[in-house]
Amino acid sequence: MTRNSDIQRNIDGLTILLFLLLASIGWFNLISAATGPDGDVEWALGTLHGKQGLWLVVSLLLGFLVLQVEGTFFIRTAWLTYGITLLLCALVLVIGRKVGGARSWFGFGGFGIQPSEFAKLGATMALAWFCSKEGGLKNLGQQLRAAFIVGVPAGLILLQPDAGTVLVFLGFVFAMYREGLSGAVLIVGFAAVVMAVLTILSGAGNLTYPLVGEANGIYRFWLLFVAMGAGTIALVRNATLPRYRSRVTTRAIVSAIAALMFSVAMHLALEEVLRPHQRERIQVLFGLEVDNPDADYNIRHAKTAIGSGGWTGMGWRQGPMTGYGFVPEQETDFIFCTWSEEWGLLGSVTFLILFAGFILRILFLAERQRSAFTRVYAYGVGGILFMHMLINVGMVLGLAPVIGIPLPFMSYGGSSFMAFSLMIAILLRLDAERFSVLR
Amino acid sequence: MDVRFRTVALLVMFFTLAFILRLVSLQVIQTEWKEKALTLTSDRQSIPPSRGLIFDRHGTLLVGSRAAHDLMVLPRELPELDSTSMVATAAWMGMTAEELEKALDKAKRYSRYKTSTVRRGVDVEEHARMAASMHQHPGFSFRTRPVRNHIHGVAGHLIGEYAEANAEDLETDPFYRLGDNIGKSGLEQVYELELRGVKGRESVMVDARNRVRDTATLLTDDRPAEAGLDLRLTLDLELQAFAEQLMQNKKGSIVAIEPRSGEVLAMVSAPGFNPDILVGPQRGAYYRELSADGDKPLFNRAIKATYRPGSIWKMVQGLIALDESHIVPSSRFYCDRSIIGCHGPHRWDDLRQAVIHSCNPYFYKTMQKVVNAGEGEGRFERAANGLDAWKQRVSAFGFGSNLGGRLPGTSTGNIPDSQYYDRIYGTRSWDFGTIYSIAIGEGELLTTPLQMANLAATLANRGWYRQPHFIRDVGGEGKPPGLGVRMDTGVDSVHFEPIIRAMRQVVEDPSGTARRARIEGIAVCGKTGTVQDEPRKDHSVFIAFAPQDNPQIALSVYVENAGFGGQWAAPIAALLIEQHLTGEVSNDRRLQRILEADLTDPYPEPESEPVTAASPAATTPAEGTQSPATE
């Protein structure tokens, strides 16, 4: 065991720098979003930026404390952390405060705590512990058990219901992939996205097919898919060496049937299961015609705000689209609009590069570990952050459907910031100890 | 490095790059978002221009502007009103609960975030009372709007009304928005385009609820309002006010013209109205009262009413006959009174005496010569051609036309021609014997007070006139083109002297019909007229100009149902002439008599029959005839 001072010296400065940069940008931007363009900034704890400032200070202090704690403590208490966050997630369903239709808050006077934010930490730790104990996710059994570990909190969160946060849990796929999950998962995921897009578009009857021309209805798409699938399989079969032929053919047929069933299920879900406003969001995303003229209000105004930013933006507290309330939820889910409107392309790209750099740095940290726990843990954190960026920024840019999740470091919300600070602090401590132990 | 690390890292970079490309497209390449943001966050508001002011000929302000208060409501800030509070609020603003509820419904339908008018034109006292308890009524506010301020309350008919634009105005001209005012009559209407100015534009920043947040804006096409052009009238405020004072408690009109320029110095139609009350909060009640008045105070008699010209016409006949060489000034006709009656003891007048005595047979015979001098075969054709030739000469005096007037409703009067009589009697079924009453200014002839004042100016100028007009200057650019065009009667100026001498004598002679128009030291030339209005008393009419040489003022005075021309119209004219030429009135008794006279009772007045200024030929109404009763 190395002395504590060596460990402090090994804490990764670049990660801290990026973290503090992102946190500062976030708070600076939140002041603008919370105060709007008129008058002077009011400095009080009761204001949004005041509360967030308090959370910032508390989180940084907490993070500093965490850095003093030995890494083994976190590893030993991984299951305890997981258990506590699970318990909180279950408890919030019973005694939580209902905000905007979801029971996801514990209220303490003026402050609230969202256990789902801390559940990400718990799940990351449990997954890291499991993977390091198993020595990877080599077989289906291990993979299923790992999926179960992240699936339980995700399921509890789905009950709140908070679909956005559940989607974020998909970020653990990257950690699981790194630990042995087949790359086919990613390919299947990609294929599923393509299939889903085609299903939505042809379901609305707006697709023009090669050779066939414009065709209405999902049935033609399915028919076409079967016909082309059969043709492709026949070609692949002829091009394959005879000894692989039967195996490849079987897999191709199974894949095609699975894809078709996915498309059918997707279509049914879209038509029968989704509530009208959810269906509208998806249709808006694909530019399909929607009966409700206000369905695309959020995303239209978000894009307008971002678009009006231009090269360098309108300046701090100068963005009228966000400042004058045209963009909804602009302190939380649509916070990126404020930044984009006021700092333009220059600011937006700077932020994205910082954010992506932060994720890549975390992944880089992961790769230099001798400890499997730390590696999986880092991948978990990086994956979660990546999912947040993907969904949130994708949403405000009109590339993903409107799903309400915060943008880490930018959105107003104490629980989110505190949970991420804890995750980063623990990662930094574990990384600092990378030379001292081999677990 | 692990290949799987590379895969994940590439995915992160790939999506980051995708987002950056999307940002480039949204923020730099697609420009429509910036325009969209501008439209969403800016609200263009129009700034009302100040309306042009109206001055008299000497630059004294006649019409300015003052503040009017409208009670406004902003539905968004309005609390829920139950029936009790609705009644209380309605009482506070002097409305019934039903009226208020209706007004609020309308306002809510218009916009929850924009103010609407609840009550237009709250008067000063009520405004003060309501403002005191304003804080108890959230959602309500006052808007101050400029309205016309008729400082001296004169010339209401001429200046006209400036009132709220109606649906038709809003539709025909996009300049006007709901609640805007527009010139509705008189000069306010004629010079609307000059007076109204150019609206300014100001953009403000608004938030998502359309509340104004900032006056600095990203839009660059703001511009200040441009004030309307000021009008300088030809009216002389002092003369106008005096003329209106003299016409108190009388019906009729006064038109005074500066002969050499055609500028109208005063124009009065009595009874009149106070234009200042018409812009105030009592407008509705006052307007109803004016509309219901049988004496038609809203009707501008000076340019719209038509009367038979009567004896004054004889001067026109004499001038035409002289110029056509049918008579010379010394020609005498025997006053035989066989076909047409006469009055007074004269028997063998020359032209001058005939004018002084208003000898009917003299002008019957004069016109007979004129009409029968027509070309053609037989008496019918000769009469027709002769009448048309005569009409041409009469028209040169401006009769039968609106004298180039731009005021809407300016009447042309009626000068009959051969076609006119053909329609009544049939072609070739009438000759001079049928139509002779027009020789002495009766029959189908109709003239307006303005035309008669113009005749006085023409006589003063010895043969020409400038078209009467009301504007000296628009916006400092001088007189608009087309005003005061010089017109010639074609009658040689030498022929005017015997007529003018006669007019002088009408006033100066102790037995003259207009001896009441005499002024010490001023050579007044005039001619009385007495126009029958059976069964009521005659209209008292007088035209005059003065001084005889280098005339400064020419005028016509009509006093309806007052008696002989010399009785009322002549002294009124004299007072105005003296006031205009010397700036004061020397004859206090004359002034006293006029001011005290109440001639509004047209006795004997049958209850049911309307007041008619002139009745054209019994069989057919004259074209273009307008009388107070039918307006």
Image: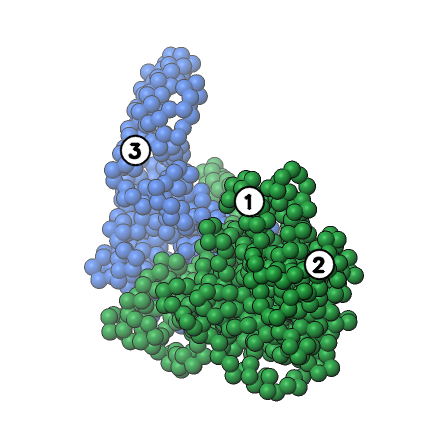
Chain colours: A blue, B green
Please state if A202 lies on the left or on the right of A84 as rendered: right
Q: In front: mark 1 or mark 3?
A: 1
Element on which disc 3 rests: helix
CA–CA distance between discs 1 and 3? Answer: 98 Å
In this picture, is B417 found above or below A287?
Answer: below
The percent position of residue A262, horizontal first and vertical second, equals 30, 31
Q: Amino acid at mark 3?
A: His
**Which residue is the site of mark 3?**
A267
CA–CA distance between discs 1 and 2? Answer: 25 Å
Look at the numbered discs 1 and 2 and tell me whether their residues touch, using CB distance below 8 Å.
Answer: no
Quarter-wise, where is residue A251 in the image?
Answer: top left
Q: Residue furthest right?
A: B494
Q: Amino acid at mark 2?
A: Leu
- Looking at the image, can residue A334 be seen? yes
**Which residue is the site of mark 1?**
B430
Q: Amino acid at mark 1?
A: Trp
Residues indicated by labels 1 and 3 sit on the same polypeptide chain: no
Mark 2 neighbour density, 10 Å: few (under 14) some (14–19) many (20 or more): many
Q: Nearer the viewer, residue A63 or B361?
A: B361
The percent position of residue B501, horizontal first and vertical second, equals 73, 69
Q: Nearer the viewer, residue B176 or B616?
A: B616
Quarter-wise, where is residue B496 in the image?
Answer: bottom right
Q: Which mark is residue B335?
A: none
Protein chain holding label 1: B
Please state if B277 lies on the left or on the right of A71 as rendered: right
User: In the image, what residue occupies the spot 33% across and 16% down?
Assistant: A246
In this picture, is B493 found above or below B65?
Answer: above
The number of discs equals 3
Mark 3 neighbour density, 10 Å: few (under 14) some (14–19) many (20 or more): some
Please state if B317 lies on the left or on the right of A110 as rendered: right
